Image: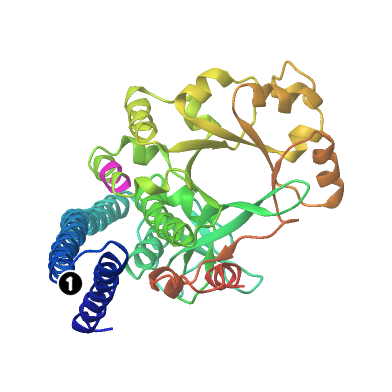
Amino acid sequence: MPSWLNNGLIFASYTLLIAAVSLALHRAGGVEVQAAVLIGAVMLLFAGQVHALVGRIQERATAEAELRGMRTLTAAMTRDMEQMRSRMEELEDALDTQTAARNEQISSEVRLVETLVKGLAESVEAGVRGGNQTRRAGDRPDPLEPGQTRLPLDSDAAEPVTEGEMIETIRNSLEENRVDLYLQPIVTLPQRRTRFYEGLSRLRGPEGEIIMPGDYMRVAEPAGMMPVVDNLLLFRCVQVVRRLVARNRDIGVFCNISVHSLLDSEFFPQFVEFMEHNADLTGAMFFEFSQSAIDGLGPIERASLDALHALGFRFSMDHVRRLDMNLSELYDMGFRYVKVPANLLVGDMRGTGSLVRAEDLKALFERNGIDIVAERIEDERTAVAVLDMDIEFGQGFLFGEPRAVREDALSAPADPLADPVRELREVRGQ
């Protein structure tokens, strides 16, 4: 209803009421007509003034309420703007930090690759100088001679080659990026659910033939080429773990690292710097060392191990031959897993140096914060025997053989909507 109409109706109501009062005063009270009209007029004026005063009070209260609401809204908008400005500043800082971290990570990777290439050139040069003279084509005797090994082929027959030829084959494999990463599953027992993978390196010859570590290591180690192979393996393990972490997968990777890398004064500091930029992988990447390597640690190797431990990375021990270990010391060094061959666990333990019974071994390790991984489980009988000892992790051909990781899978970006199980199978070339 319009305000003028509302006010008119109110004024008419006042007029009728006061007219009725004036009439009652005249007839019932004996007041003269002129006096009754004057009294009515005064009453009407007074009612108008009261009504106007009440209206102004209501309007003022309404205005004050609206003003308070506007002030509250303005304060809320100011807070929102401050929060938005603060959030934008945080996003800018986070973007700058992420960009700087990414750039530094790329730089560290480039420096790492440069170190690998430089190490490859130096090790090949040293290996060639110390190797035997390459034999001429067609001049290959049937029996193996001193300084010869066999290059594995796809056929049953393996061709004997000299150390110089093997060094040349290894060099070509490294230069042409024919170093493959293989993954073998480590499963939980008894569920047999994949919990970890072990990263293994394989070289490919010029015809695509697989060169196993047992064939190239005896030539590469004296030639000083093993650090290059190991470092390439580490580099690819980081790529695989980073891809798995992008999937939020509850899976880790065991990556072997040699004592040569711990002793490499040029490579190892850059490797530590590289891992600093991948500190988010500490819960998913475990470095693996042999028992003999740990037994022979010197001050330099121990300091290198401590540097990795300080970054938050944890370790695993493999190639175990003795079980008389100082478990508390291993835990303090950062070891959380020890791989024990299944035949040592289920067989005669008298030659292992263990002072406890086989069925008590798991509890002893567990009290010291270390888990046992039963490796080389090849048949169901061995798996059942390991289960009887309550071992929680197992590895072996029974649960899966090593499979190569496809090169394009390492370089492809992770799709957050993809099926992680299917993609992991694709990565492993299944």
> The N terminus is located in which quarter?
bottom left
For the residue marked with disc 1, what is the amino acid? Val
Element assignment for label 1: helix
Residue 407 in percent (x, y) is at 44, 72
Q: How many marks?
A: 1
For the point 49% across and 36% down, the residue is: 315
Q: Is residue 396 left or right of residue 40?
A: right
Between residue 47 and residue 284, name the one nearer to us: 47
Residue position marked by numbered label 1 in the rendering: 33
Please say whether residue 273 is one of the residues in the magenta stretch.
Answer: yes
Residue 324 lies in quadrant: top right
Residue 93 in view, yes or no: no
Between residue 33 and residue 137, name the one nearer to us: 33
- The majority secondary structure of the magenta stretch comes to helix
Instruction: Classify 140 as above or below 238.
Output: below
> The C terminus is located in which quarter?
bottom right
For the point 26% across and 56% down, the residue is: 109
Instruction: Classify 356 as above or below 314.
Output: above
For the point 49% across and 72% down, the residue is: 406
Please say whether residue 346 is one of the residues in the magenta stretch.
Answer: no
Q: Is residue 344 left or right of residue 136?
A: right
Coloring basis for residues: rainbow
> Which residues lie in the magenta part?
271-275
Residue 295 in view, yes or no: yes
Residue 216 in percent (x, y) is at 48, 55
Q: Is residue 282 left or right of residue 358?
A: left
Residue 16 lies in quadrant: bottom left
Between residue 118 and residue 27, name the one nearer to us: 27
Residue 22 in percent (x, y) is at 24, 69
